[in-house]
Image (tube, rainbow, N blue to C red):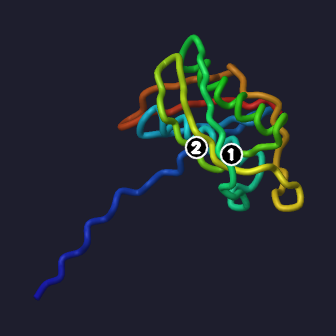
Amino acid sequence: MIKKKPEASPRRRRPYRQLPHTADLAWRLWGASLPELFENAGCALSATLTDRRYLRRRATREVSLEAFDREALLVDWLNHLLYLFDVDGFVGRDFQVVSLTDEHLEARVTGESFDPARHPSLTGVKAATFHQLSIVPAGDGWQATVVLDL
């Protein structure tokens, strides 16, 4: 009897990757859908702030944002997550976009309070910027480039 080789599963690409940048931090983000792209942007930001492996799911924050277009909404999303971190000491681990249009986002962010004793501080981020910002269709999904001001 000849055994058939199992079909190879499609290789899953990392949802974000750091890009070279002279003074700030740039990320290339991917998602099969726009909501997934925004969720992956949240993951990239939390990975910039601390090691996500040490974050627990202790609290959930509801987020509702409006902006004049999709790109501005991505910047507002990241800056709102930075606001939660800077003002409330809350760092997200899991991100669920519940509703998304070009001008409106509803999401749930699950994470916990930042604890310097348990969470290594990796990089201080001031803000997400519009510099080199793009969101474009790519293959079977979406791709974005975003630069964070350090």
Instruction: Name the residue located 53 percent from the left edge and 41 percent from the top edge.
Output: 96
Q: Residue at x 81, y 36 (%)?
A: 125
Which label is found at residue 83? none
Split into 4 quadrants, where in the image is the N terminus?
bottom left
How far across and how far down the image is residue 3, in percent?
A: 18, 82
- Residue 126 position in % (x across, y down): 82, 31
Q: Tally the numbered discs.
A: 2
Q: Image quarter for residue 107?
A: top right
Q: Secondary structure at mark 2?
A: strand
Check the image and name the residue furthest to the top.
68
Question: Disc 2 vs disc 1: Cβ atoms closer than 8 Å?
Answer: yes
Label 1 residue SS: strand
> What numbered label is drawn on residue 95?
2
Apparent side of residue 6 relative to residue 55 in the rendered image (left or right): left
Looking at the image, which residue sits at the far bottom?
1
Residue that label 1 marks: 92
Residue 116 vs 88, above or below: the answer is: below
The C terminus sits in image quarter: top right
- From the viewer's side, name the closer residue of 60 and 34: 60
